[in-house]
Amino acid sequence: MKYTELSPSALAAEYDKVLAEFEGWKAKGLKLNMARGKPGKQQLALSTELLSVLTDPADCVDEGIDARNYGELCGLPCARQFFAELLGCKSSQVFAGGNASLTLMYDTVSKAMTHGMLHSERPWCREEGLKWLCPAPGYDRHFKITESFGFELITVPMTPTGPDMDLVEELIRDPKVKGMWNVPKYSNPDGIVYSDETVRRLASMKPAAPDFLLIWDNAYCVHGFDGAYVPFADILSLCAQYGNADMVIEYASTSKITLPGAGIACFACSEANLAYLQKLMDVQLISYDKINQLRHVRFLRDKAHTLALMEKHAAILKPKFDRVVSILEREIAPLGLAEWNRPKGGYFVSVNTLPGLAKRTVALVKEAGVVMTGAGATFPYGKDPNDSNIRVAPSLPPVEELEQAMEIFCCCLKLAALEQCREQ
Ligand SMILES: Cc1ncc(COP(=O)(O)O)c(C=O)c1O
């Protein structure tokens, strides 16, 4: 029965019961973590071979290039080819970089600010009142990048098929709108895969800003854990078909394929964009870590082999996601306190509580020893207008700990809801 349907005395009794349960959890002094999308130890072990795959100096050569030395700013040919196959583009469009795609994204925005994009009339920092489109719920670190450069962040609601495209098409008529964040496959946190129609509408946009930047963060492009591999469009050629070849830059990394923070990352874009960005990057560094690039290609080999590895990740992740959803279904669904997605890939379960419960729930959960992503983090400026979205990251804890953490989460959500009922 829903809490709002309980009599005052039944509500008081339920409150006492849930509070006692909460105090019981607190007394256990647990330290559990469901905060960020980190692979668990079992997943990291899948890449152990990466640590020993390159031991012979004679083996450090790719197409005549010695990976041990300076050079090849755009990355080793084999690393560029690896990402090109993964993303379905040409290797001449790929820049294979260092250990984090987030750095590459930050760097692109930073360069646009200081030097402008390929079609900029002036560096962005010379313009006033710049705005950026942020599909939300979305990735907090994306939002922080554009916030830190002073953009006004414009929230675009996510729908089951991707960002609300009617709104996007209206907003891009404003020349102050310089770009947009996108996680097109298994979005963070909703796990939404953009529909073909959404992708087509994005690729064919005609923004008023001539230097509009569509950031296509394909962080989870091969990260399904439920069902067959889901293919995706090559956004670079799709944009080119619509006369927008230079509008998009795509990003990806091996962070959740091998070892996060010790993987390799890339961006891919039109050859004209790459030539422009390469010139700017040439001032900044001589080359990224090609040893790690080579190590990764030796280990991952190609797309087929990478997908086979992702199936092993999937076998570890799926039971964890299943547990999260089944505990929510058992504990929360009958009370109608929240709704959640059932993702088939990515790293998160996105829970939407009744309005006004998210912050309090996460605070209670913390008191009981479980760290979660801060409520509101999935919205621009960390402000969820409904105080409703909570990002659950089930990958790190072992299943037994995850079960405890979810029991605590459900207990705290109930307690937050009961407190709200009592106040009203
Ligand atoms: C959507 C998205 N992009 C990028 C990243 C970070 O990737 P990297 O480790 O390559 O910087 C994450 C990590 O959670 C993510 O969720």
Image (cartoon, grey):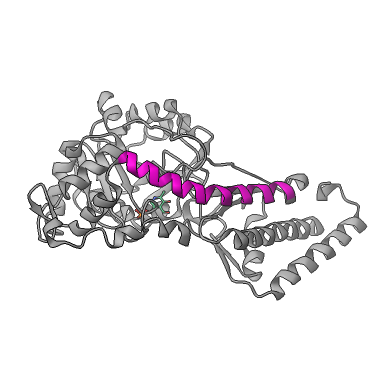
Relative side of 159 to 361, left or right: left
Q: Does 407 sit above or below residue 108? A: below
Q: Quadrant of residue 55?
A: bottom left
Q: How many marks?
A: 0
Residue 358's spot in the image, x, y percent? 63, 55
Q: Does 73 sit above or below residue 85? A: below
Residue 370, magenta (yes or no) = no
Relative side of 332 to 286, left or right: right
At 24% across and 51% down in the image, what residue appears? 298
Q: Which residues are magenta?
A: 303-330
- Residue 213 visible in the snapshot: no
Residue closer to the observer: 106 or 301: 301
Residue closer to the observer: 334 or 165: 334
Q: Main secondary structure of the magenta part?
A: helix
Residue closer to the observer: 122 or 15: 15
Q: Does 283 sit above or below residue 4? A: below
Residue 231's spot in the image, x, y percent? 39, 32
Residue 283's spot in the image, x, y percent? 12, 57
Residue 299's spot in the image, x, y percent? 28, 52
- Residue 87 visible in the snapshot: yes
- Which residue is the extreme one toward the left? 64
Relative side of 207 to 193, left or right: left
